[in-house]
Image: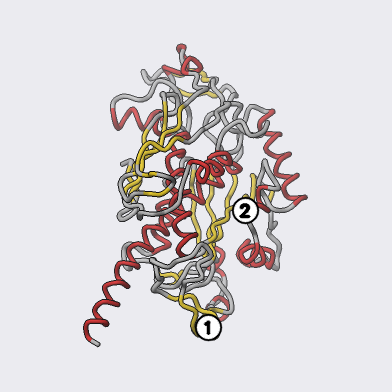
Amino acid sequence: MSTFGRNFRVTTYGESHGRSVGCIIDGCPPCLPVTEADIQPQMDRRRPGQSDLSTPRNEKDRVEIQSGTEFGRTLGSPIGVIVKNEDQRPKDYGGSTMDEYPRPSHADYTYKMKYGIKASSGGGRSSARETIGRVIAGAIAERCLSKALGVEIVAFVDSVGDEFLFPPTPTNPFPSTHPGLTSLVSTVTRKQVDSFAPVRCPDVEASKRMAARIAHFRDQKDSIGGTVTCVIRNIPPGLGEPVFEKLEAELGQAMLSIPATKGFEIGSGFGGCSIPGSLHNDAFVSTETFDAFPVDLKNSQTNGSSQQQQAGLTTKTNNSGGVQGGITNGAPIYFRVAFKSPATIGQAQNTASYDLQDGILEAKGRHDPCVVPRAIPIVEAMAALVLMDAALTQFGREEFKRRFQQADS
């Protein structure tokens, strides 16, 4: 399906080489200050043609709000946003080979088996071009979360192929055990990440190694995968709906819906399986500045200062990644997403046609040799959509609880 969310619902539309792509957002609270200028920065981080390490397709990806706002504020009605495709080239996908042969490891074959038809140019709905609608909606959701709670969401590249931001060592075999990651979880900013464009790995030497790796595979008409880490700060405890809508489950679904994703882990992730409980457990400690629900929506400020400040508990370590029992505990959330090597490559590949004849496919078109640098705002967007949905659910619950208590007093 093309709709995501329950309270904050997003429906995306459009194909890779159609006239436009975009989305409809339903359930956005009214009176949120938002214009195209608030959305465009994330679109610019996602758009193609940013460097010689990405696809040469040159799209401006200009955002146009069609409905749901007036005088720079949301009305509470559905928000329609459109982005026109300006550099589409359907002819790149014509000819006998691209029409007759499904691209290996691409969605060409599975889409045709499911629907009996597929888009004749590009990947259609399976193209990463579809994620434009997600990034638009995520930018608006993130603006809501920032205004009401002071939430910060920052993603960055932590590996490309066999080049790692935190190379495994006997002492720190997994990124989650590395003290450098602990520091980034607390301090990394989006401005810092973007200063290392086009790779967006927040380390000078690691970024250079990763750029060289991408360039190597690009020059070989090949591709390579990588991983993205996402950090979320200032999330209050209480978000997540056990048992089937635990927050990490919702984040996992959201991330694995992004094209080319193959894995998801939160907190210590798979590395935590080899750590005994005595070392893995996050001990609780008291804190004097505990951000608690409920938030005063009516009087909320842009820095989240309306949150209740009271004494409470936090954790000394954060192997849980900010989520325990499917519910946020107030600590920063951090998780990793794995992206495979892009399927469409320029090398000739032995394969078979739809009519079962062996042959050779040499794919045409313009494609990324590695998707992780441009996936950063997509990961941030999907995280924002999950959190916005969860926050609206919890706000509603807390408001009813407050009214019940008020009625009983």
Q: Quadrant of residue 178?
A: bottom right
Local crowd size for mark 2, using a 10 Å CA cut-off: few (<14), some (14–19), many (≥20): some
330 and 292: which is toward the camera = 292
Residue 233 visible, this orientation: yes
**274 lies above or below 110:** below
Q: As drawn, is 289 to the left or to the right of 355?
A: right
Residue type highlighted by circle 1:
Phe
Residue type highlighted by circle 2:
Arg
149 and 409: which is toward the camera = 409
Residue at position x 68%, y 68% from top? 179
Task: Give the foreground label among 2 and 1.
Answer: 2
Between discs 2 and 1, the one toward the N terminus: 2
Residue at position x 73%, y 53% from top? 203
In the picture, the disc for residue 284 is: 1
Q: Quadrant of residue 324?
A: bottom left
**245 lies above or below 41:** below
Disc 2 marks which residue? 190
